[in-house]
Amino acid sequence: MVFDKLKSIIVEEFELDENDITMNTSLNDELDIDSLDLVDLVMTVEDEFSLELPDEALEGMKTIGDLVKYIEEN
């Protein structure tokens, strides 16, 4: 499942508790990631899911659920 795999990546990258990650978790507010962290996350997600996340797509992503939806659709 995409969500479980993405959650695992986020927990590992940002050393968070997996129970704190849900589909509604905000990428900016709750994860408190800066632009450099976002670049690292994007690179990891692109490698893990063999896809490209264009900047335009990232601009509209606010939650983990948004990212999961993009991955599932692409």
Image (cartoon, grey):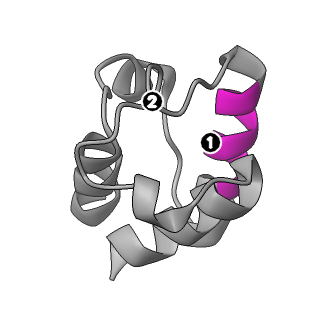
The answer to whether residue 32 is left or right of residue 29 is right
- Name the foreground residue: 18 vs 53: 18
Label 1: state its secondary structure.
helix
Callout 1, which amino acid? Val
Residue shown at 62% from the left, 42% from the top: 42
Task: Decide: few, some or many residues near mark 2? Use Cα within 10 Å; few <14, some 14-19, many ≥20.
Answer: few
- Name the foreground residue: 70 vs 29: 29
In the displayed orientation, state which residue is furthest to the bottom. Answer: 1
Quadrant housing residue 50? bottom right
- In space, the residues marked 1 and 2 are separated at their CA atoms by 17 Å
Quadrant housing residue 22? bottom left
- What span is in magenta? 37-44
Label 2: state its secondary structure.
loop
The answer to whether residue 47 is left or right of residue 19 is right
Q: The C terminus is located in which quarter?
A: bottom left
Residue shown at 63% from the left, 53% from the top: 16
Residue 69: x %, y % from top left: 22, 53
Disc 2 target residue: 30
Callout 2, which amino acid? Glu
Figure check: 40 above or below 74: above
Using the image, tell me which numbered label, if any, was put on residue 42: 1
Nearest-to-viewer mark from 1 and 2: 2
Residue 12: x %, y % from top left: 72, 63
The answer to whether residue 63 is left or right of residue 6 is left
Residue shown at 68% from the left, 16% from the top: 35
Residue 40: x %, y % from top left: 75, 39
